[in-house]
Image (tube, rainbow, N blue to C red):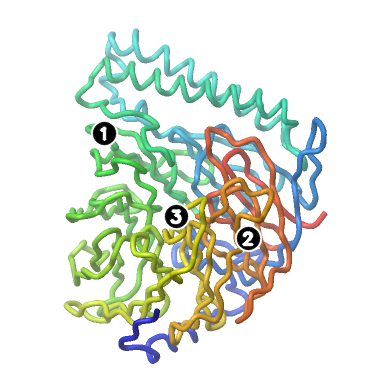
Amino acid sequence: MIRMRNRCAPILLALAAAAGLSRAAEQGAADYQPTPERPTGFRGDGTGRYPGATPPLTWERKASGNAYATKNILWMTRMPSGSVASPIVVGDRIFVCANFADLLCIDKRTGRIAWSRSNGYYEAATEADLSNSDFKSSVTPVADDLRKLNDRILEQCNANISSTGPSPAQEDAMTVLSNQKRDMEVKLFKALSAYDKKRFCGTPYMQHCGTTSGTPVSDGTRVWACFLGGVNGPCSMTVACYDLDGNRKWLQFIEGINAPEHGNHSSMLLAGSRLIFMGNDLTIGYDKDTGRELWRVKGPGYNDGIAVPRSFKVDGEDAMFRAHSKANILRLSDGKVLSDYKAIGWLWSTPMIENGIAYYGDRNKRVILVAVKMPARAGEAPTELYRLAMPDDTKNTERESGMVVASPLLHEGLVYSICEGGTMAAVDAQTGKEAYWATPFSTDVKWVKKPGSCASPTLGGKNIYLMGDMGACIVLQPGRAYNALATNVLEERPLNGFSFISTPVFEGTRMYYRSGAYLYCIGER
């Protein structure tokens, strides 16, 4: 089942680096703060490890009559609409996304939504558009109605913050408002398209996984995020930069990208002075301060992007591993292609790179884990070290068990990888030999309607947290034997079809989680 090539030596370096951070710099500590040198984004610093945190082992939210009973939920805030993007923590603020193209700032102490900013099609209107009489008569009134509705929804969200959240009846009423928001956004787009169908084209909400899938990134002073929206083609995108108080610094629009079904779910990469946007077959390097486009690279064969670009060093300079259905290595300073990798398979799983070793799962070939040595010099090709295929007898009647969406977790010499069907493996990072196979989210778990996991395994303090797609979270003790310490359940009414797909974030004694309908703050009570 394992195919071995050049191995061992480079992986030992990665294992040593995994434990090399000082206590003061540990991600997850209560006083941890992102900086330009160590920004935060998808999976925090990209590792999915929060060793400085001390989160709870147990919590729950379960329906109890006409209300909900909860344990160890400090607060939960209703979101205006669904999203699969993960939250990020920046000081006293939490940043999350909400469809259609909204960036929200949450006060992490209270759960209150401090501000919300839209970044969709209407924001692409020029000064000439805004002063045009036809625009003012046909588009502006709809935009004003949407703004009023958004304000009303935010008031309702903030009015219902508590440790139990709204009752089921209140949830249903708030879902009606969210559906009205969606309908109004479609109405606004149609008004824009009627005004100028060449610039405003496409179909809002055409991607079934949503329009705000990329996790925001921050350097501690500003926050960047990308959304479906903008102008000039179906699946066009918007890239936005804000300060922490919600003042927009710049906004850029990207013409339509190749995103026929799922849309573009890649989060952006922040490295040094560069902000990297990757949208399926298109990668763009921006000056993070000004939004000026510095370079763009278009590559054939990319489709349905989910994997997030990851950075490492080539010839001592920042480079990135760009991978979907084909892969290559780009230099971040100018976008130059340094190396190609044709044996990539098809990535939905975001690679995790430590000391030049990339670990990821293959979405298309029932391969739960691949380890590849990244090139140290331009012109060198990546070298596969090993791959681990799913067992032939792996079955899951609810989902395609071999598709890997989650990014793997490296911790204390083991790599933990889970597929969308709920089967996971703990693998010796040095040899590629499995320590164990397990199926945490199996069909005999009664509260799970569709077992599986798209969220990435995450280290919170000393333990590993596995979030299932339907609200179950299993806490594992790390090691070479499967040992579940706790099983936790969050019950809620799904919002716009979104469930529990994002990845949790840990800080101090708290875990923050963005479900389809809520942002949860989980901690000991």
Provide the residue designation for mark 2: 506
Question: Disc 3 and disc 2: Cα gap in Å?
Answer: 30 Å
Q: Amino acid at mark 1?
A: Pro
Q: Position of residue 432 (x, y in %)?
A: 43, 82
The numbered mark, 2 or 1, whose residue comes first in the sequence reads 1
Residue at disc 2, secondary structure: strand
Q: Which residue sits furthest front?
A: 393
Question: Disc 1 and disc 3: Cα gap in Å?
Answer: 29 Å
Quick one: label 3, few (<14), some, or many (20+) residues within 10 Å?
Answer: some
Look at 63% across and 26% down and name the residue there. Answer: 174
Residue 400: which disc? 3
CB within 8 Å, label 2 to label 1 = no
Quadrant occupied by the N terminus: bottom left
Q: Nearer the viewer, residue 187 or 132?
A: 187
> As drawn, is 115 to the left or to the right of 461?
left
Look at 24% across and 49% down and name the residue there. Answer: 293
Q: Nearer the viewer, residue 174 or 482?
A: 482
